[in-house]
Amino acid sequence: MTDPNFLVLASLAEGDKHGYAMMEDIERFAGVRLGPGTLYGAITRLEERGWIRGLDAEDRRRPYRITGAGREYLEEQVASLGRVVKTARERLKPA
């Protein structure tokens, strides 16, 4: 799964993070390195949809938090992905 929106929400589901911390976390758990343009493009889209919100800046770094609506959306996506994975596993079983 390499969708930046999904990856940012999954990262923030663990707790508040600023951009660089999200990039590091996503690389650690997903093996995907999001560039700054991709990451901040996703952050902008997620804020516009109300799925994350920016918090007061700490020094120059601004942390973000997943909202209730963002958590709901992430749960829906995880359930959908789970169905796809289940189907793929079943289809990979030897005949």
Image (cartoon, rainbow, N blue to C red):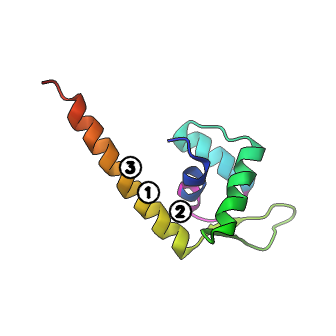
Q: Residue at x 33, y 45 (%)?
A: 84
- Furthest residue toward left: 95
> Residue flagged by tag 1: what amino acid is it?
Gln
Q: Would you call the spot at circle 3 few (<14 residues within 10 Å), some (14-19), or many (20 or more)?
A: few
In the rendered structure, does residue 20 fall within the stretch colored magenta? no
Q: Residue at x 49, y 41 (%)?
A: 1
Horizontal and vertical percent for residue 58? 81, 67
| Circles 1 and 3: CB atoms closer than 8 Å | yes
> Residue flagged by tag 3: what amino acid is it?
Leu
Reading the image, the residue beneath label 3 is 81
Reading the image, the residue beneath label 1 is 77
Horizontal and vertical percent for residue 41? 73, 52
Residue 12 drawn above or below residue 95: below
**SS at badge 3:** helix
Magenta region, residue range: 10-18
**SS at badge 2:** loop
| Quarter of the image with the C terminus in it | top left
- Compared across the picture, whether 88 is left or right of 37 comes to left
Q: Which mark is residue 13?
A: 2
- Compared across the picture, whether 44 is left or right of 30 comes to right
Q: Residue at x 68, y 41 (%)?
A: 34
Q: Earlier in the sequence, mark 2 or mark 1?
A: 2
Q: Earlier in the sequence, mark 2 or mark 3?
A: 2
Q: Nearer the viewer, residue 89 or 55?
A: 89
Residue 4 drawn above or below residue 16: above
